[in-house]
Image (tube, helix red, strand yellow):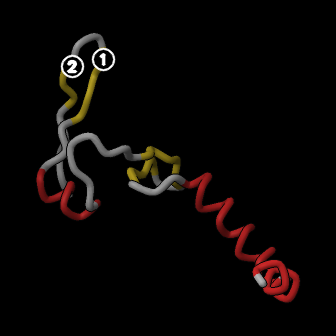
Amino acid sequence: MHTLKLTQIGNSVGVILPKEVLVRLKVEKGDVVYLTDSPDGVRITPHDPAFETQMELARQIMKKRRAALRELAK
């Protein structure tokens, strides 16, 4: 567990993530992270949850319409 301190950054308040956390998230300066609600609080993730939902729906459609997509690809 890491303890994070809130700090003033311009007109906003920010959190400085320790280097070990950045390595675990596989992010670096300039990357975008997403803050999502979870049952026990909030979660920081480098993956866009809305995009994940869209991709799951696309996978289902591609699986269902595999033959049609194969013919279109020819």
Report the residue at 31% width, 45% height from top. Answer: 31
Q: Quadrant of residue 9?
A: top left
Which quarter of the figure is the C terminus placed in? bottom right
| Element under disc 2 | strand
Tell me the residue that label 1 is attached to.
12
Q: Nearer the viewer, residue 14 or 70?
A: 70
Image-based side of 5 in relation to 37, left or right = left
Residue 41 at x, y = what percent?
A: 45, 48
For residue 37, above or below residue 55:
above
Which quarter of the figure is the N terminus placed in? bottom left
Q: Nearer the viewer, residue 8 or 73?
A: 73
Report the residue at 21% width, 50% height from top. Answer: 28
How many numbered callouts?
2
Image-based side of 47 in relation to 28, left or right = right
Residue found at the very far top of the displayed protein: 11
For residue 10, above or below residue 36:
above
For residue 38, above or below residue 60:
above
Report the residue at 51% width, 52% height from top. Answer: 48
Residue 24 at x, y = what percent?
A: 23, 64
Q: CA distance from mark 2 to mark 1?
A: 5 Å
For residue 69, above or below residue 53:
below
Badges 2 and 1: C-beta atoms under 8 Å apart? yes
Query: Tag on residue 9?
Result: 2
Image-based side of 36 in relation to 60, left or right = left
What kind of residue is marked 1?
Answer: Ser
What kind of residue is marked 2?
Answer: Ile
Report the residue at 44% width, 46% height from top. Answer: 34
